Amino acid sequence: MNPEIKNIIEDLKEKFDPEILNITEKNDKRVTVDIPGKAIINISQYLYHDRHFRFIIASALETKKGFEIYYHFSFDRTGLIMNLHVILPAEKPEIESLTGSFEGANWIEREMHEILGINFLNHPNLEKLISQGNWAEGVYPYRKKPLS
């Protein structure tokens, strides 16, 4: 492993233990860090302010575990992509919004809310982005099963 990447990972473990649930090195340019949803703000701000990572985008999917969100960050100097991975419960998928830290999170959080029904707490505007008039309120077309 690249020494700089190793240093970043060790620092994360030291600063955020026990919020670091698992770290998986996919290859020498991609690392996934599993964290609880409640830690997303502190860890993402640390990556941005202290380690100079750039927020790229987030992606979400519904699995047997619940709703999984991957927040993708880039350390441009080395080409490292670090994914912060959270799992939200299927019954109440909600997490703090990153829009207060990263304006770029605005649209992707709106999209994830609209198609999967994930609630982003303190998001400034969770209005529909792509489907106005295409499906009924409370219908989330990418969910495997409808809300009960």
Image: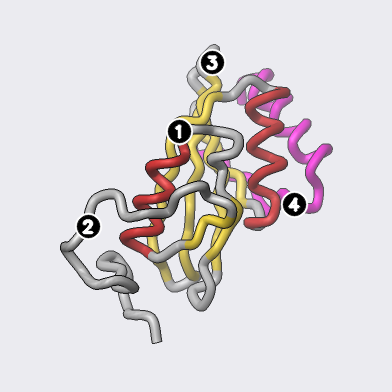
Q: Secondary structure at mark 4?
A: loop
Q: Residues within 10 Å of mark 2 (few under 14, many from 20)?
A: few
Disc 3 and disc 2: Cα gap in Å? Answer: 41 Å
Q: Name the residue beneath numbered marker 4.
A: 19
Q: For this view, does 42 lie left or right of residue 133?
A: right
Q: Name the residue beneath numbered marker 3.
A: 78
Q: Residues within 10 Å of mark 1 (few under 14, many from 20)?
A: some
Q: Which mark is residue 132?
A: 2
Q: Position of residue 13 (x, y in %)?
A: 77, 40
Q: Name the residue beneath numbered marker 1.
A: 104
Disc 1 and disc 3: Cα gap in Å? Answer: 22 Å
Identify which residue is drawn at 20% across, 68% down: 135
Q: Earlier in the sequence, mark 4 or mark 2?
A: 4
Tell me which amino acid carries mark 3: Thr
Q: Quadrant of the C terminus?
A: bottom left
Mark 4 against mark 2, which lies toward the viewer? 2
Task: Assess whether residue 77 is covered by the magenta stretch.
Answer: no
Mark 3 against mark 2, which lies toward the viewer? 2
Tell me which amino acid carries mark 1: Gly
Q: Earlier in the sequence, mark 4 or mark 3?
A: 4
Q: Earlier in the sequence, mark 4 or mark 1?
A: 4
> Residue furthest toward the top?
77
Q: Earlier in the sequence, mark 1 or mark 2?
A: 1
